[in-house]
Amino acid sequence: MSSKAQQRPAAVQILIIGILALWMILAAFPFLWTLWGSFKVEGDFFSKADWVYALTGTLTDVETGGRFTGDGYYGAWVKEEFWRAAMNSVLVCIFVVTISLTFGTLGGYALARSTYRYAFWFLIAALIFRAMPPITLVSGYLPVFFGWNLWGHLATCIIVLVAINQPFTLWMLHSFFKNIPQDLDESAMVDGCTRFQAFRHVIIPVMWPGVITTGLFSFLLAYNDFAVTAMILSKENQTMVPKIASFLGTTQTKGNVMFAVAAVVSTTAPLFLMIMFFQRQIVSGLTAGAVKG
């Protein structure tokens, strides 16, 4: 069959490109709209009179003297000290990812190479633990944290997030290690390596895409968590997601919605950049875990 016959008709190609372009616009629209609105005042972005105000910035011009304003970002980051929440999120994510990957790689490798039956039941128990809603686990921790004066601290939050995240890292890394031939370990040990040296110098370099992929998922769990961080952390130690919720106020106190909008953009933008930067590692890591080696 000729190459021309195998090619799609021009109309089909145009249709596919059009559908993909439409899908990308629809997928990106909520974030782009929020980004645009973060530079407006609340009266424009949430206008009940005319939604066009959100585009033209009519009230923004009246209140600030320009069609765009950075008052939302200034209020969130400077007045409400959102930078403290950002620093707390960075610290929590670094420690959660580091601890989860350290124990996950060692535990996943040990379980993948184990010939004992208990390894299977250990993974089943971890899966059951991971399937439980985090809120039910946190409620059991709270009496202990209050009694031992551990509530409100970042270290306590890190310990709980690691406990919740560890079953996932074990399962994911276990599947990656299972797809690496055991001959690599044995060959390295025949050449004089210990089990740990074979793991460090031979297996980990092969496993690197899987480790990065698992680390990114662990990062996202800690970065986006609300239930655990909102229940365990005090107001002074809040991470970004609970801090955003505090900008919305309550039935007793008035919040500032535009601070929340600016904070949402500030929180979401790094995720887009991170996913774009690590997209190849994510794809290769998921592929490595899905294809039998």
Image: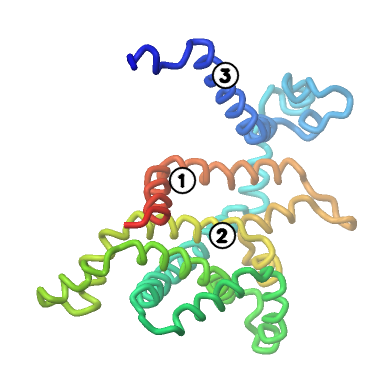
Residue under the image location 88 percent in, 29 percent down: 48
Which amino acid type is shown beneath numbered disc 1?
A: Met
Pick whichever of labels 2 and 1 is earlier in the sequence. Answer: 2
Using the numbered discs, state the Cα–Cα distance from disc 2 to disc 3 in whole angstroms: 34 Å
Q: Is residue 268 left or right of residue 135?
A: left
Which amino acid type is shown beneath numbered disc 3?
A: Gly
Using the numbered discs, state the Cα–Cα distance from disc 2 to disc 1 in whole angstroms: 14 Å
The answer to whether 99 is drawn above or below residue 51 in the figure is below
Residue under the image location 39 percent in, 13 percent down: 5
**Percent position of residue 19, x then y:** 59, 23
The residue indicated by pointer 2 is: 221
**Percent position of residue 186, x then y:** 19, 73
The residue indicated by pointer 1 is: 274
Colour scheme of this structure image?
rainbow
Rendered-image quadrant of the N terminus: top left
Q: Is residue 292 left or right of residue 118?
A: left
Label tally: 3
- Taking the view exactly as shown, the residue that stands out farthest to the left is 191
Rendered-image quadrant of the C terminus: bottom left
- Asked if marks 2 and 1 touch (Cβ < 8 Å), the reply is no
The answer to whether 292 is drawn above or below residue 117 in the figure is above
